[in-house]
Image (tube, rainbow, N blue to C red):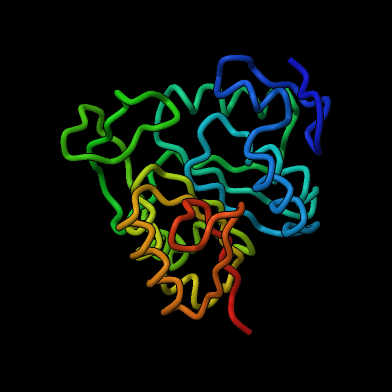
Amino acid sequence: MPVLQGRLKGKRWIAGSHTHGCWLGSYEYDKQLLFERTIADGDIVFDIGANAGFYSLLASVLVGPQGAVYAFEPLPKNLVYLKEHLRLNQIENVNIIEAAVSDFSGVASFDSTPGSAMGHLAITGKLQVKTVKLDDLFAGRQIPLPTCLKIDIEGGELHALKGATSMLAEARPQIFLATHGKEMHRQCCELLHSLNYDLATIGVESLEEADEVHASPRT
């Protein structure tokens, strides 16, 4: 189906691959608008927890042919949709990394039972997936320095940030972070503050109550 509104209007989207808000163009609308205002032509965007690829597609449009997107996704079902969305829309500036982002590089158990949008690393998971640590990938010259990170990984966000502290210190990217649970939110905010980031909510909640954060490097 064609996306009905927004910067992705007219792009092709597979109905049922994620929430209907994607093809309606209304998915996470406040976050989507801020994402559009933040990302510029030529930027390097990491979509961590790419799912079926809505933000990967949006970022690919925003960064243009001179920019690049790195989409990180471990779940095979989501990868099928992600790859097909890139093919259907003839997207050439998105690089897929078939792995979960964490604080170590290796293999871990993944629980896919909550559904394709809520799968996460868990010791009880029956699926084995590759994990990557962003600092390791950057040190090995497998990824460039990003200008923006979007992180939505269902409770693994603190591990992802801890595995990227060296890269974050050097790149100082903008960060769009979805947190899952109050304690996870608190720890992520503390870590970002320690890395000299200013935090703002995406929405009307206070920072303590929010679960969507926009982190900007402190000048």
Residue 25, how many percent across, how many down? 73, 30
Q: Is residue 144 left or right of residue 190?
A: right
Instruction: Indicate whether 156 appears above or below 123.
Output: below
Residue 98, how many percent across, how many down? 44, 38
58, 136: nearer the viewer: 58
- Picture residue at 43% right of the left edge, 74% below the top: 166
Instruction: Indicate whether 78 appears above or below 150.
Output: above
- Picture residue at 35% right of the left edge, 59% below the top: 158
Q: Residue 88 sits in which quadrant?
A: top right
- Picture residue at 34% right of the left edge, 47% below the top: 155
Counting the numbered discs, the total is 0
Instruction: Indicate whether 11 appears above or below 64.
Output: above
What is the quadrant of the C terminus in the image?
bottom right
Instruction: Indicate whether 215 appears above or below 170.
Output: above
123, 171: nearer the viewer: 123
What is the quadrant of the N terminus in the image?
top right
Q: Residue 41 sits in which quadrant?
A: bottom right
- Picture residue at 78% right of the left edge, 26% below the top: 11
Q: Is residue 135 left or right of residue 89?
A: left
- Furthest toward the bottom, the residue is 219
Residue 169, how many percent across, how many down? 49, 77
